[in-house]
Structure formats: structure tokens, C-alpha cells
Image (spheres, grey):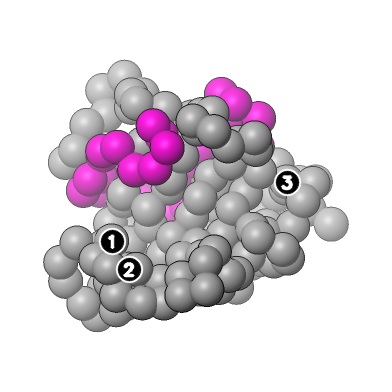
Amino acid sequence: MAFPLSFVPSQSWMTGIRRFGANRTPTRRHAGCDLYAPDGTAMHAAASGKIIIFRLFYKNAWAVTVDHGDFIIRYGECKAKLPPRLSVGSTVEEGQVIGWVTKMTGIVNTMIHLEMYDKSATGELTNGSAPYNRRADLIDPTPFLNAWRSELPDAP
């Protein structure tokens, strides 16, 4: 498996507002991990799979959702275009560039917002169920990111 960036972000995805489960409002929690990266940074597929959704996601940023076989990842806060020759239905290889981080309207930091699903449920990923407002098979991506980080040459 591959880390979704070519480097380890300087700010941890395990602390503060970036971590999975961080409070967003009194009734809503953060449904993913945020990997801070500069605008235009390439986002990489964590594993081989198939692009199943590409659409507007949050604050004028898009998300590419990939079915990786055993799990689904939504890679959020990307530019509104996929790399050449990629579209919904395309297969991707582990480590392949699947998009680029973008600046969101009204948000200072740029990042990949990464959500994972174990495929034990079906339907829309965002569905309004508290506390995450996500489908019931949402899982914490932290242990996966921690394992994938160790594969990077500059990993601590």
C-alpha cells in the first residue's frame, strides 16, 4: 500500500482538528484524517482500484472516490479535474497520481481529507447520520496512514 502523498506532512493527522473523530460541532465529528499539503500537490492512490465517484465535495473542492477492493477511500479537497485519461470507471494503480490538492473557499490550510469505508454498507457515503454524517461502514484511516507512512523514504 502507498501513502497518498510523496512526503509525510509536517503536521500530524493524529492530533487536533486534523484527526479522525475530532469535534466539528457539538453534534458532528470529523469523518476522516487531514493531510496538510501545498496547493497543487499530487494525490496518490493508496492501492490499485477503480474510480467510482468524482464530484464536488466541500467548499468548492472536489473528491475522487476509489474502490480499492477491500475498502473504499474518498480523497477529498482536490482540483476539479482528474489527470489525463482518468475518469469515473477508470482503473488506477497503487501510487498513481489521481488528483491534486486545491485551495478551498474560506479555508486557510490546503490538504487531502481522507475517509475510508470497509464496504459493509451501501449507498451514499455522506448521508446525515450523526455523529459523522457518513455511511455506517466509515472506519478510522489513522492506522492505515501510519502503516503506509513507514513505506516513504523520509518517514520518521
Q: Which residue occupies 54% across, 33% down?
A: 106
**Is the C-beta separation of discs 1 and 2 under 8 Å?**
yes
Query: Mark 3 or 1, which is nearer the eye?
Result: 1
Point out residue 16 in the picture as x, y percentages from the top left corner: 72, 63
Residue 56's quadrant in the figure? top left
- Residue 45: x and y, percent? 44, 46
Q: Classify 93 as above or below 34.
A: above
Extreme-right residue of the structure: 156
For marks 2 and 3, the one nearer the N-term is: 3
Q: Specify the segment rendered in magenta.
A: 37-61
Residue indicated by mark 2: 134
Residue 117 appears left or right of 154: left
- Give the amino acid type for the residue marked by disc 2 in the picture: Arg
Question: Which residue corresponds to mark 1?
Answer: 126
* Element type where label 2 sits in the image: loop
Q: Amino acid at mark 3?
A: Pro
Q: For residue 59: magenta?
A: yes
N-term mark: 3 or 1? 3
Badge 1 density bin: few <14, some 14–19, many ≥20, Cα 10 Å: some
Q: On the image, numbered disc 3 is attached to which residue? A: 9
Above or below, 70 against 114 in this view is below
Image disc number at residue 8? none
33 lies left or right of 76 = right
Visible in this render: residue 121? yes
Q: Is residue 116 above or below residue 153?
A: below
